[in-house]
Image: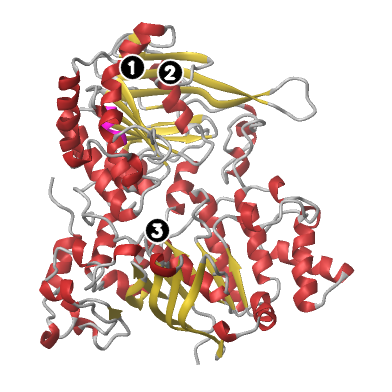
């Protein structure tokens, strides 16, 4: 059994006729101890997915309109607030992009750390304090004991994110949701934080759902990747397969759009034309079709499902694309097309 | 081995007008006053500390570094948007720091800026057409008809459909807004552009569109550009030369290939190794040098070399003597400010 299984999740924002579906039929799994990435551009629904899992989508702003979120077999969406509180913290913990807004500015770091230790593990006084020091040591904060009396504003961005990781790990959760945790950090600090999370997750065998827009970060962190576009998962694969044998033209486009540090200036980038659709005006067929140079009539007419592509049928890879399916359904895309779209244009 | 100290001088002293250099900053220093609680006087924050920089005609110079390293302040001080506290900036042989009023404005027509945030840098009450024509009004750019014609021409060039002329910024996406920002910068036909993190706020697929646009505009118009960024992969893709900044100082300057294939300053090495590469095979094989600690506060920078507190090579001398930016003879060679730099590339005379 998977640790986390998300089935056909639908999340809406707004009310009545103006409601938009930000997450539309998202399904994926995270196994125990596994690191899985959700990657996509702004507005693709990756953060809304994480918030739905944690029960952080609160009416009237939005609501989870359908699906299941099974954590160790129990549906989080059907739990009482009390049961959910028990799962949060000790079962699933979350780390957010901006530690300044998720730490309480008027409480010391020590107070915030011991609070969750008391709440979930029943540790008090000196025992809680000792564990808090241990946690700060674990996230490699120098002079941990004296840092307990610091306030969040006295710490740098990188230090704050370390405190967040310490808090997330404090109750030995089985799953951590990490939502764009290094986006606000400088690159040398990002490297520190990523290495820390990678090491600690491996040591404590904690599974991580890693949400990011950065394909470079994905390549170094995740075992599996789910690419999201316009509220749906459009490609899902093992990390190595996704980068070596991407199937869906949107994934080709993403990979072709990022310049690589290890490649000399060769030619023009291959951007994706146009921009993602508005949530309120989703195309009726494939949601990427209006921007796709490989589209055919079927793409504009009917939405493709998430299925194993023709070329990778023996692999654990899925795409939401008519062009990659077997010949009876179309299946006109080939490796040749992929190379053509990933190569840089000659100057 | 470390360089001979004598080499320090020849690079930087030359101030005579060199026709290949469009912009030359010497000993550029910018101080800000910041209030300190409990103190009577504000403290002095030296954001840029004695920066020497040459920007060659027709090149794209990338300026990279982490937040607070002074890269944006350097760009603004070069354009005189922030007046430097000390040092000189010459543009095409003309000293800018002593210019005022109308004469400075006349120079400004020739040098423009593209801003990071396409949401904050456009007046929401002006139409796209008005926004693009505004610089022409300031720089006495002909009649209303001529201005409109020029705006439409520039809109074609940057890829904004003409139908947007009468519409407003809130109707545009981030990428299109950035195109408007670029159009505003280019409408007065400048020679020099300072682009301050122009693609940082954009999603990757849109970022690539704007990078390509800047690249082709630079080629077609023969622009000289200072491209300020924290994304080292974008800089490698776009720029001819690179200056790496740390805590208000330039630590390394060289052509793109030298910096990326053979970085000489320890900070540059660490910075490059920290950038994730979108390829799991490469990413998992390569060695990373992860720096410990944070960037020190610019209010109280370390003595001597500013990087020494995080440097694995630091010796006693680094604590005492600030290293000078020095290197191979000419202003365009590989320059590095370090007491113990990596040896230069073995090729070359």
Above/below status of A291 relative to B228? below
Q: Assign a secondary structure to mark 3.
A: loop
**A178 in the magenta segment:** no
Q: In the image, what residue occupies the spot 70% across and 81% down?
A: A82
Task: From the viewer's perspective, tell me whether residue A214 is left or right of residue B294.
Answer: left
Way the structure is coloured? secondary structure
Dot 1 alpha-carbon crowd within 10 angstroms: few under 14, some 14 to 19, many 20 or more: some
Q: Quadrant of the C terminus of chain B?
A: top left
Mark nearer the N terminus (1 vs 2): 2
Which residue does the numbered mark 2 point to in the structure image? B80
Q: Are marks 2 and 3 in contact (CB under 8 Å)?
A: no
**Which of the two marks, 3 or 1, is nearer to us in this view?**
3
Badge 2: chain ID: B
Above/below status of A301 relative to B205? below
Q: What distance separates the C-alpha of mark 3 from that of mark 1?
A: 36 Å
Give the residues drawn in magenta, as a range: B181-185
Which residue does the numbered mark 3 point to in the structure image? A42
> In terms of depth relative to the viewer, which is nearer, B225 or B5?
B225
Residue A230 percent across, percent down from the top left = 33, 66
Residue B257 percent across, percent down from the top left = 30, 42
């Amino acid at each position: 059994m998977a640790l986390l299984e998300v089935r056909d999740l639908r999340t809406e924002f707004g009310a009545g006729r103006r409601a938009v579906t930000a997450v539309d039929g998202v399904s994926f799994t995270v196994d125990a101890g596994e690191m899985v990435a959700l990657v996509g551009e702004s507005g693709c629904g990756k953060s809304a997915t994480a918030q739905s899992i944690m029960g952080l989508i609160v009416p009237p702003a939005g609501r989870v309109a359908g699906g299941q979120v099974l954590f160790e077999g129990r549906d989080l969406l059907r739990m009482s607030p009390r049961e959910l509180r028990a799962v949060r913290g000790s079962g699933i913990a979350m780390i957010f992009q901006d530690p300044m807004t998720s730490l309480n500015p008027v409480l010391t770091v020590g107070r915030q750390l011991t609070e969750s230790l008391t709440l979930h593990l029943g540790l008090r006084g000196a025992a809680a304090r000792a564990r808090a020091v241990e946690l700060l040591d674990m996230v490699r904060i120098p002079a941990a004991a004296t840092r307990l009396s610091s306030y969040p504003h006295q710490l740098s961005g990188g230090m704050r994110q370390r405190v967040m990781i310490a808090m997330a790990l404090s109750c030995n959760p089985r799953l951590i949701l990490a939502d764009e945790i290094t986006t606000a950090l400088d690159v040398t600090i990002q490297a520190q934080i990523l290495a820390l999370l990678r090491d600690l997750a491996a040591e404590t065998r904690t599974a991580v759902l890693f949400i990011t827009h950065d394909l470079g970060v994905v390549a170094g962190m995740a075992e599996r990747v789910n690419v999201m576009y316009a509220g749906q998962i459009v490609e899902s694969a093992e990390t190595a397969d996704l980068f070596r044998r991407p199937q869906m033209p949107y994934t080709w486009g993403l990979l072709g759009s990022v310049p690589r540090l290890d490649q000399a200036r060769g030619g023009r980038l291959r951007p994706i034309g146009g921009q993602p659709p508005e949530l309120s005006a989703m195309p009726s067929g494939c949601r990427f079709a209006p921007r796709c140079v490989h589209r055919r009539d079927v793409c504009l007419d009917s939405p493709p499902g998430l299925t194993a592509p023709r070329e990778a049928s023996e692999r654990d890879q899925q795409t939401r694309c008519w062009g990659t399916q077997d010949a009876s359904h179309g299946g006109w895309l080939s490796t040749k097309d992929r190379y053509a779209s990933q190569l840089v244009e000659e100057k | 081995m470390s360089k001979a100290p004598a080499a320090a001088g020849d690079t930087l002293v030359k101030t005579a007008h060199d026709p290949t250099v469009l912009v030359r900053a010497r000993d550029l220093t910018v101080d800000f006053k910041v209030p300190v609680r409990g103190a009577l006087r504000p403290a002095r924050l030296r954001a840029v500390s004695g920066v020497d920089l040459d920007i060659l005609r027709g090149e794209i110079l990338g300026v990279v570094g982490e937040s607070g390293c002074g890269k944006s302040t350097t760009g603004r001080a070069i354009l005189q948007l922030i007046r430097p506290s000390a040092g000189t900036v010459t543009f095409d042989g003309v000293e800018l720091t002593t210019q005022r009023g109308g004469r400075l404005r006349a120079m400004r027509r020739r040098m423009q800026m593209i801003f990071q945030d396409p949401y904050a840098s456009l007046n929401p009450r002006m139409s796209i057409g008005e926004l693009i024509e505004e610089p022409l009004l300031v720089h006495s750019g002909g009649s209303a008809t001529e201005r409109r014609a020029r705006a439409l021409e520039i809109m074609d060039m940057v890829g904004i459909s003409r139908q947007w002329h009468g519409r407003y910024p809130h109707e545009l996406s981030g990428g299109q807004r950035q195109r408007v920002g670029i159009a505003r910068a280019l409408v007065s036909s400048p020679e020099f552009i300072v682009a301050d993190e122009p693609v940082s706020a954009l999603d990757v697929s849109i970022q690539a569109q704007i990078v390509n646009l800047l690249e082709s505009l630079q080629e077609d118009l023969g622009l000289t550009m200072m491209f300020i960024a924290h994304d080292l992969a974008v800089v490698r893709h776009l720029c001819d030369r690179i200056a790496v900044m740390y805590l208000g100082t330039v630590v390394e300057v060289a052509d793109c290939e030298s910096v990326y294939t053979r970085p000489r300053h320890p900070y540059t090495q660490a910075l490059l190794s920290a950038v994730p590469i979108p390829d799991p095979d490469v990413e998992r094989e390569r060695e990373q040098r992860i720096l410990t600690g944070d960037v020190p506060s610019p209010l109280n920078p370390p003595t001597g070399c500013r990087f020494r507190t995080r440097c694995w090579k630091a010796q006693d001398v680094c604590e005492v003597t600030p290293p000078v930016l020095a290197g191979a003879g000419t202003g365009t060679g590989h320059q590095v400010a370090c007491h113990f730099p990596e040896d230069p590339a073995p090729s070359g005379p």
